Image: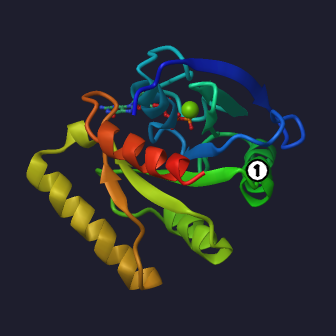
Amino acid sequence: MNINSVKFIKSSATLKQCPPAGLPEFAFIGRSNVGKSSLINMLTGRKGLAKVSGTPGKTRLINHFLVNDSWYIVDLPGYGFAKISREERTRLAGMIEEYLLNRRTVKLIFLLVDSRLEPQKSDLDFIAGLFRLDLPFLILLTKSDKLTRNELSRNTGKYQETLEGYFSRCPVLIPCSSRTGFGKERILGETEELLKEM
Ligand code: GTP
Ligand code: MG
C-alpha cells in the first residue's frame, strides 16, 4: 500500500475530544518505550510525525493521524510504566480503556511487544483483556534489529507457545523493526486487507 499523505489531526485526552468517529482506525498500543511512535514514523515514512523518546511515558494523549485522507493511525500512550505517578497511570489506563471499549471504528489493534523479552505480565494481562472483549488485534514484535535472525525466530516461537499455553490460541505475530523497516510490508498489508473489506 502506498501512503501518499499523512496529517496530524489532534491529540485528545478523552474519547469525547477525539475526531468525529467515521473513518476506519488502526490503533497502536503496548508498554511504554516499546516503540509505538517510532513504528508509526517508520510505517508512514515521516520521521518526526509521532514524538519519540528514550524516556518511557512520552505519549500521554490519544493522537490521530489521517492517512491518505481516508483512515486513521492512532498513537496511544503506553501502559505498565512504573515511574509515573499512580494518578497519571490510572488516568492513562482509563483513557486507553475508554477508547478501546467505545471507539467502534477501530478496525484493528496493533499490540506491540519487545521481541527481546519473554511475554511480560502486563502484556499477558492486556492480551487477556483483548481476548475477553473479543477485540481484533495482532501482535508486533518490535526492535527485531537488536536480535540475530536465530534469536528472533526462537523468541517468536516462544511467544506463540506461551500464548497458546495461556489462551489456547495465538493471534498473528509480526516481527518488525523501526530501524531497518523490517515488517513494514506485512503490517501495511494487514491494514490494506481490512480497508479493502470496507
Ligand atoms: P511511549 O510513548 O513512552 O509509550 O513510548 P513508545 O512506545 O512510543 O516508544 P518510542 O517510539 O518513543 O521509542 C522508545 C525508544 O525505543 C526510543 O529510544 C527509540 O529510538 C527506540 N526504538 C523504537 N523502535 C526501535 C527499533 O525498532 N529498534 C531499535 N533499536 N530501537 C527502537
Ligand atoms: Mg509514544
For the residue labelled by badge 1, is the local secondary structure a helix, a strand or a loop? helix
Residue ranking furthest to the top: 48
Q: Which residue is mark 1?
A: 99
Where is residue 117 drawn, in percent x and y? 33, 55
Ligand 1 location (quadrant): top left
Q: Quadrant of the N terminus?
A: top left
Compared to residue 161, the image places residue 142 above or below, namely: above
Q: Amino acid at mark 1?
A: Tyr
- 59 or 81: which is nearer to us? 59
- 30 or 67: which is nearer to us? 67
- State left or right for residue 36 relative to residue 149: right
Where is residue 172 drawn, in percent x and y? 38, 63
- State left or right for residue 20 relative to residue 196: right
Where is residue 97 drawn, in percent x and y? 75, 56
Q: Count every numbered label the image shows and give the total.
A: 1
Q: Any atom of ligand 1 within 8 Å of the CB at mark 1?
A: no
Where is residue 26 drawn, in percent x and y? 58, 44
Please tell me which residue is depicted at 45% across the width and 42% down the height of the picture: 34
- State left or right for residue 114 relative to residue 23: left
Q: Residues within 10 Å of mark 1 (few under 14, many from 20)?
A: some
Please tell me which residue is depicted at 30% across the width and 76% down the height of the picture: 161
Please tell me which residue is depicted at 61% across the width and 49% down the height of the picture: 79
Compared to residue 127, the image places residue 182 above or below, namely: above
Structure colour scheme: rainbow
Compared to residue 125, the image places residue 78 above or below, namely: above
Give residue 63's quadrant in the image.
top right
- 120 or 103: which is nearer to us? 103
